[in-house]
């Protein structure tokens, strides 16, 4: 029943409650013994989902009851995320038993405060180009774009997630396929004194166990932009896979080996990467596969683990503490 003090609210106007609800959720997470910093993206997304996806909020409620409803609905999402212990354990057991191959996308580096694709427009503007198409046509501006992105990377530090992946390499993580331009895995390796081989160009592999960087590398900036020869793949382009990687899978017999496949912070919207990496390693032959990301709509999927990389990797990786060797 509508009272005199209640009114109807469009979803956009409900974000006035976001900050007080967030403070309440931070206290809730802390009381449960979890780190607010590791779960902050989940708190934010839980509030978004509570506002945008719950039809109950369309009811006419008083402001106080409306805020309580948003908080209550947000807690449902947070509780669901924190209750996925069975999935954490399953993933950990598969990695311990069979080791793994990791594929990581831009979402992984987000926790180190690197800009995601939607913020790269600021660098384009700084380089005085309108869009990615114009950048491709202007080699001087493209070179400046790379240099500017490298300067940003130089100011960033690897997250504990980066360090945890490196700490488990190569015993529990055979190969790291990184689709990002940044050098955070390389920095992580130096910080904990773990040697790591890297392939950032399409050249024959001369050993085993690599960090593969198909899409470009701030440690390999060239004036031209030839894919496979140090060229960078831009966000509006399809992915790139080295011929040497496909050969490597055959030569090392990794293509025929049973391992766990873990995909972290990657949207899987590039056809080449999906067909030549994701589908191949997940389905041909079938392997235990887990996806880690922030999409709350996938909470019901057993093999999709919602959470930040740092939070979840601490739960699923056999080596879950970071020590310099």
Image (tube, rainbow, N blue to C red):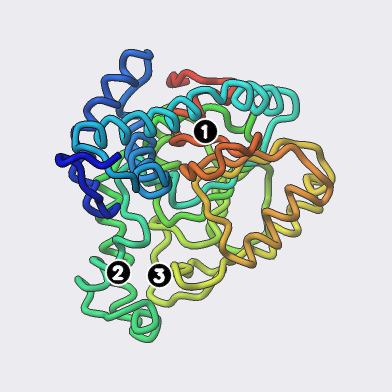
The residue at which mark 2 appears reads as: 145
Distance CA(mark 3)–CA(mark 2): 12 Å
Res. 8 visible in picture: yes
Q: In the rendered view, tell whether residue 169 sits above or below residue 151.
A: above
Total marks in image: 3
- The residue closer to the viewer here, 92 or 247, is 92
The residue at which mark 3 appears reads as: 222
> Earlier along the polypeptide chain: callout 3 or callout 1?
1
> Earlier along the polypeptide chain: callout 3 or callout 2?
2
Circles 3 and 1 in contact, beta carbons < 8 Å: no
Q: In the rendered view, tell whether residue 45 sits above or below residue 225.
A: above
Residue 302 is left or right of residue 319, and the answer is right
Residue 59: percent from left, percent from top: 33, 44
- The residue closer to the viewer here, 24 or 247, is 24
- The residue closer to the viewer here, 179 or 27, is 27
Residue 293: percent from left, percent from top: 50, 42
């Amino acid at each position: 029943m509508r009272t005199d003090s209640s009114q109807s609210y469009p979803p956009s106007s409900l974000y006035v409650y976001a900050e007080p609800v967030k403070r309440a959720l931070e206290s809730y997470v802390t009381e449960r013994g979890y780190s607010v910093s590791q779960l902050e993206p989940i708190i934010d997304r839980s509030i978004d989902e509570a506002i945008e996806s719950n039809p109950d909020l369309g009811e006419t409620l008083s402001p106080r009851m409306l805020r309580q409803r948003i908080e209550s609905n947000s807690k449902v999402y947070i509780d669901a995320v924190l209750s996925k212990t069975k999935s954490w354990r399953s993933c950990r057991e598969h990695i311990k038993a069979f080791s793994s191959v990791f594929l990581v996308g831009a979402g992984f580096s987000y926790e180190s405060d690197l800009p995601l694709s939607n913020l790269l427009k600021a660098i384009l503007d700084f380089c005085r180009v309108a869009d990615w198409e114009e950048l491709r046509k202007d080699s001087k501006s493209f070179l400046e774009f790379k240099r500017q992105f490298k300067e940003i990377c130089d100011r960033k530090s690897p997250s504990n997630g980066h360090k945890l992946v490196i700490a488990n390499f190569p015993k529990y993580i055979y190969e790291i396929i990184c689709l990002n331009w940044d050098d955070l895995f390389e920095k992580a390796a130096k910080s904990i004194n773990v040697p790591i081989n890297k392939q950032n160009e399409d050249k024959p592999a001369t050993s085993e166990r690599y960090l593969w960087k198909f899409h470009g590398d701030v440690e390999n900036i060239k004036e031209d932009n030839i894919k496979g020869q140090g060229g960078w793949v831009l966000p509006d382009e399809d992915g790139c896979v080295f011929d040497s990687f496909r050969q490597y899978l055959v030569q090392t017999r990794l293509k025929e080996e049973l391992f766990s496949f873990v995909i972290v912070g990657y949207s899987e919207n590039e056809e080449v990467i999906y067909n030549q990496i994701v589908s191949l390693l997940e389905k041909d032959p079938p392997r235990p596969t887990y996806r880690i990301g922030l999409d709350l709509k996938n909470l019901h999927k057993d093999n999709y683990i919602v959470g930040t990389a740092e939070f979840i990797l601490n739960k699923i990786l056999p080596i879950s503490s970071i020590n310099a060797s």
